[in-house]
Image: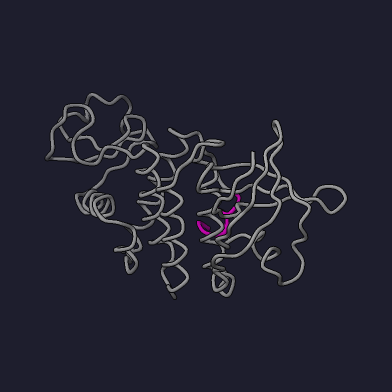
Amino acid sequence: MFAETEGIIFKQVKIVNGRRMLLLFSKKYGKISAGTNMNEKGKTKSSLALRPFTYGKYEVIKNREIINIQSAEVVKSYYRIGEDIEKYMSCSYVLEFTEKILEEEEPAPKLFRLLLDFFEMIERRTKRYHSLVLAYQIKALQEVGNMPEVNQCVVCGKEDDIAFFCIKEGGIVCRKCNPNLPNITNDTLIYPINFGIVNILRFILSNPLSRLEHLALDEKVEVQLSQMIRSYIAYHLDIGELKSESFLFD
């Protein structure tokens, strides 16, 4: 098999004889592991296309179970991401999160486009990166079909008197159904919420990411929403603490 595909490098690992193993988010094939003999050093189009935060085109050859990248060129390099350490770590977290929610060799073109939109927006942004990271995570969960229920109580279907977000149940719960949830007072996976947070979730879900570029959440809301989303992906997607979390959530 020989093909061209657009892609974004998740990460690379040096192995023997100057060879590298790349984890590539390709538009055509989804997440793939591929080897290459191309050199990352230098400022050629092919070397720059092997680095994270670069949108590139890749020539891919598959021989039996082995995938190799024969050539690469840059479509766009989001080099400004590296000019700010907080921005860089925010984007590193998003790459790591995206890698974890993708299945091997399962195309996800809408998520691919969402990631590029995120790069475009955060490159222009000068502060409050975490609000945009949260918006991306919520939209990404929506794209892969793992978004929690935020429009009605997951127990009875009621749309009003919402009081809790229950991780185990997978969404919001009304006050009447509260007694039906065991050990609610001691359960760290149940979050008391107000309609402000519910409305924020609904607003993010009902708008394209491109309209959320200037989203800046209240810091207390941002902290609670972040805790909820991290707990949700840990419970439902079995994604534990990511390496880049220690910087973002100290």
Seen at 23% across and 48% down, the residue is 198
Seen at 69% across and 63% down, the residue is 46
Seen at 76% across and 57% down, the residue is 38
Seen at 50% across and 36% down, the residue is 106
- Measuring from the top left, give residue 65's x and y in whole percent: 69, 32
Quick check: is 247 in the magenta stretch?
yes
Q: Nearer the viewer, residue 230 or 109?
A: 109
Please give left or right for residue 47 compared with residue 10 in the image.
Answer: right
- Measuring from the top left, give residue 227's x and y in whole percent: 41, 48
Q: Nearer the viewer, residue 21 or 207?
A: 21
Please give left or right for residue 22 compared with residue 157 in the image.
Answer: right
Kindly give the residue lying farthest to the front in the view shown: 2
* The N terminus, quarter of image: top right
Quick check: is 80 in the magenta stretch?
no
Q: Nearer the viewer, residue 172 or 68?
A: 68
- Measuring from the top left, give residue 55's x and y in whole percent: 55, 61
- Relative to 128, residue 50 above or below: above
Please give left or right for residue 17 compared with residue 174 in the image.
Answer: right
**Residue 75 figure quarter:** bottom right
For the record, the magenta segment spans 243-250
> How many labels, in total?
0
Color encoding of the figure: one colour
- Relative to 203, residue 3 above or below: above
- Measuring from the top left, give residue 199's x and y in whole percent: 21, 52
